[in-house]
Image (cartoon, helix red, strand yellow):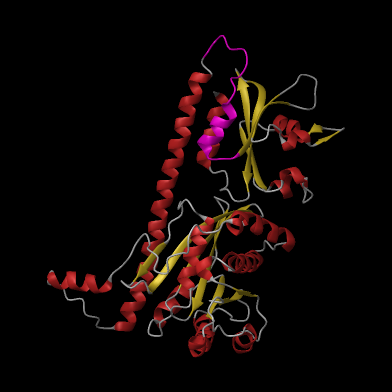
């Protein structure tokens, strides 16, 4: 079930990849991880056997940027396809906001695909989820096999409902992002509708999600993904038992059903705590970047003989916040358009160039109304009422930080948050507030 955090304006959506053993569920997550996060900033957590067949589940957390003023976070899980891990599948599927049914196109998997399809419906019902209402996307995987079954035949067996479907070769990235984007859009619509925040413009939602995944669509893996991927964490059950036996501990399963169900729940909790620790580590690194930028900025502004701001201030501050776009604007006495002292990356400021005879530039209007630091979470809706100019394409949010000296405002910093970037949190607001004072 989706989790809303009103204080931080975030929503976390859970998506589950379901399918038969060795059908490509884990490969989807590994490939998606490589395409969307080539620098490895987000961790892919797995509990797997020694031969890399998923024993419990895989967890891939992702930040997708802003939708309707909320930062969307996505957690993707896979389930074990082996028949004897029924309790694990049911536990991982609990609370799913969307499902991807990964179908193995090989003729040998035909019987297992049908069984998995039926098993998915049963486990959705066991978790009090309506199979006909839960957003579901079908992926025909392994289309590169020389004897892959015809899509028409697969469709007759497994998609009589006419669910959205995509052909894929998960090892090469083909169809992976498209499948993910489709189930994510459907899950967001369903989730927002449940909470009384219905998505009014689905086309706009589609554009936001597609924009967030644009780079992933363009990115081609440097090499064929390893069919036996490694992960951040691995659990070798046989080695664990041997180790415990050497210590004199009895680890035989007495009540297999209850113990397995409990272990799955515990493993999921530990994986999410691991991701939480990684988030704290990333936050610590961000703060380090910010402190470094401010310490480099102070000497640049310390020269009492300097009558103008030194060049490079904006680029330095953006680097510290790990942002890509922003401007340093100064007021012009008697004018309704501001002086663009610096603008990264192209020397122009979109909001200062957006003008009207009545109020002048949008940038001037925003800066005059802002004190300290203010944030617009959804620039398209809140600022332009859904009719934003093309100059702010790809921009989700905006931060305005006043520049003042002895209490007199002389300009502002405008920092643009892209769709794919995280929202402006309290840490970053304090950073820009400090920069404005300096």
Residue 85, given in percent of the width and then of the height, sits at 38, 81
User: Is 34 situated above or below 118?
Assistant: above
Residue 160, given in percent of the width and then of the height, sits at 65, 87
Residue 126, given in percent of the width and then of the height, sits at 49, 83
Q: On the picture, is 364 further left or further right than 424?
A: right
Between 134 and 314, the one lying in front of the other is 314
Q: Is residue 141 magenta?
A: no
Quarter of the rendering containing residue 200: bottom right
Residue 24, given in percent of the width and then of the height, sits at 48, 74
Q: On the picture, is 159 further left or further right than 249?
A: right
Residue at the spot 56% in from the left edge and 77% down from the top edge: 143
Q: What is the magenta range?
A: 303-324
Between 106 and 134, the one lying in front of the other is 106
User: Is 343 situated above or below 392?
Assistant: above
Query: For the view shown, which residue lies furthest in the front direction?
Result: 146
Quarter of the rendering containing residue 335: top right
């Amino acid at each position: 079930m989706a989790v809303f955090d009103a204080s931080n304006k975030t929503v976390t959506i859970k998506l589950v990849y379901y399918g038969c053993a060795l059908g490509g569920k884990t490969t989807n997550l590994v490939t998606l991880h490589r395409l969307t996060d080539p620098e490895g900033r987000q961790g892919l957590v797995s509990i797997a056997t020694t031969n890399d067949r998923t024993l419990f589940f895989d967890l891939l957390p992702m930040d997708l940027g802003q939708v309707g003023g909320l930062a969307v976070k996505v957690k993707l899980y896979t389930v074990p396809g082996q028949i004897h891990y029924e309790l694990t599948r049911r536990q991982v599927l609990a609370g799913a906001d969307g499902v991807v049914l990964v179908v193995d196109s090989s003729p040998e998997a035909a019987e297992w695909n049908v069984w998995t399809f039926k098993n998915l419906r049963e486990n959705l019902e066991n978790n009090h989820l309506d199979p006909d209402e839960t957003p579901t996307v079908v992926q025909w995987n392994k289309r590169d096999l020389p004897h892959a079954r015809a899509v028409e035949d697969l469709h007759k067996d497994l998609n009589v409902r006419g669910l959205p479907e995509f052909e894929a070769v998960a090892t090469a990235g083909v169809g992976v992002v498209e499948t993910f984007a489709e189930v994510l859009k459907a899950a967001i619509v369903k989730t927002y509708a449940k909470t009384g925040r219905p998505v009014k413009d689905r086309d706009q939602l589609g554009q936001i999600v597609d924009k967030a995944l644009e780079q992933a669509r363009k990115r081609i893996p440097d090499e064929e993904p390893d069919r036996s991927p490694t992960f951040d964490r691995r659990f070798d059950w046989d080695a664990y038992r041997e180790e415990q036996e050497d210590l004199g501990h009895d680890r035989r399963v007495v009540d297999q059903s209850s113990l397995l169900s409990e272990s799955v729940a515990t493993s999921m909790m530990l994986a999410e705590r691991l991701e939480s620790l990684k988030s704290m580590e990333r936050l610590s690194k961000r703060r380090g970047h910010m402190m470094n930028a401010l310490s480099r900025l102070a000497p640049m502004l310390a020269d009492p003989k300097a009558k103008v701001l030194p060049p490079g201030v904006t680029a330095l501050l953006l680097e510290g916040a790990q942002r890509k776009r922003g401007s340093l604007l100064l007021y012009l006495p008697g004018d309704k358009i501001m002086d663009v002292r610096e603008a990264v990356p192209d020397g122009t400021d979109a909001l200062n160039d957006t003008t009207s005879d009545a109020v002048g530039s949008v940038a001037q209007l925003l800066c005059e109304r802002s004190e300290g630091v203010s944030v617009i979470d959804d620039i398209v809706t809140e600022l332009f009422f859904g009719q934003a100019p093309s100059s702010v394409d790809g921009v989700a949010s905006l931060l305005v930080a006043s520049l003042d000296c002895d209490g007199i405002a002389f300009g502002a910093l405008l920092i643009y948050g892209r769709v794919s970037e995280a929202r402006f949190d309290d840490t970053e607001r304090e950073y820009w507030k400090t920069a404005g004072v300096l």
